[in-house]
Image (tube, rainbow, N blue to C red):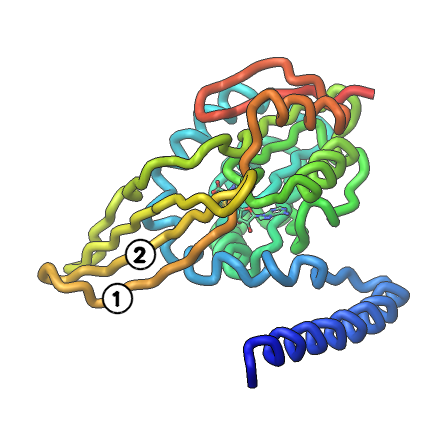
Amino acid sequence: MSEADDLAYGAGQRARWEAGRSASAESFRAAGVALGWEDRGVGDSYAVTAEFYDLLQADEFRRLAERLIRRWLGTPEVGVLDVGAGTGLATALLAEQAGVVVHAVEPAGAMRAVLLSRLAGQPHLLNRVRVHAVGVQHVGLKAVADFAWCVNTMACLDPLERAEGLAAMRAALVLGGRLVVQRPPHRLEPPWELPSRRLGDDLYTGQVTCADAGPGKALWRFVYRVTRDDHVVREARESFEVHLAEPWAFADELRAAGFDPIAQDEKEIVVALARR
Ligand SMILES: C[S@@+](CC[C@H](N)C(=O)[O-])C[C@H]1O[C@@H](n2cnc3c(N)ncnc32)[C@H](O)[C@@H]1O
């Protein structure tokens, strides 16, 4: 098959799959069954990263989350929204500290698997968390929270998804509700190393490089290695398309979605209030 045939075949397959998908999705919806199919792309992502995420990134993230939650959570009375809950690091902290339901929104199956395992290991949290297996732009929650948390996630959303996602967060919040959100990055970052961890005799490491992927986009490549006696015994890779936004442009997007930015915190954190 030539490359052109291959592309045409792929497009035909995709069209047939899309047609089948909407027909079946329609019948499931009619029966009131929630489908996450719109998120099929992101649903499959983090398949490699989920395994290494907590081992290599939890300590640093937990320190940041604990500090931000201490400073900004207050005492929610309606509910909490955790957008891009990932492996549930912040979800568990929020559920421990807020006496209301935490809506954890996480479209990627691999990350959700870790999130659910974390919750399963903490039975006292089980009735405080509701998991939504869709992208935030499809979550459809209305006035269920007075605190929303979206850290380390915005970069995954393209500009349209970002606008829809912010509008969905606004809809999920009651008037005056507080949003703590990490802005998307606005430039390419130099390569960096994730904190390494020893597990038995093995050393787990992770490297991240960042490449230009066209206007407003970057490709973040994660390489995970397991080393024993200075020999690499395993290597796994995953790349993510990351969407960039200038800080001022993101502030405008927040306003357009019905938020008033009121404060900044370090690590690109913006605090905003839901307005009418
Ligand atoms: C880098 S991880 C961060 C997870 C968690 N917030 C943390 O900091 O540990 C980004 C998460 O956002 C999720 N995500 C991607 N697109 C999303 C969307 N449209 N709505 C909600 N979450 C999304 C990914 O599946 C992933 O779990």
Q: Quadrant of residue 137?
A: top right
**Residue at mark 1 to residue at mark 2: CA–CA distance:** 8 Å
| Residue shown at 11% from the left, 59% from the top | 230
Q: Is the CB atom of the residue marked by disc 2 within 8 angstroms of ligand 1's nearest atom?
A: no
Around disc 2, counting alpha carbons within 10 Å, would you say few (fewer than 14), some (14 to 19), or many (20 or more)? Answer: many
- Evaluate if marks 1 and 2 touch, with contact meaning CB atoms under 8 Å apart: yes
Q: Is residue 265 above or below residue 166?
A: above
| Residue shown at 67% from the left, 76% from the top | 8
Residue beneath disc 2: 224
Q: Amino acid at mark 1?
A: Arg
| Residue shown at 75% from the left, 72% from the top | 15
> x, y (%) of residue 172?
75, 36
Q: Which type of secondary structure does the marked residue at label 2 adopt?
A: strand
Q: Quadrant of residue 30?
A: bottom right
The residue most toward the left is 229
Front-most of 59 and 158?
158
Residue beneath disc 1: 234
> x, y (%) of residue 17?
73, 74
- On screen, residue 230 versus residue 1, left or right, reads left
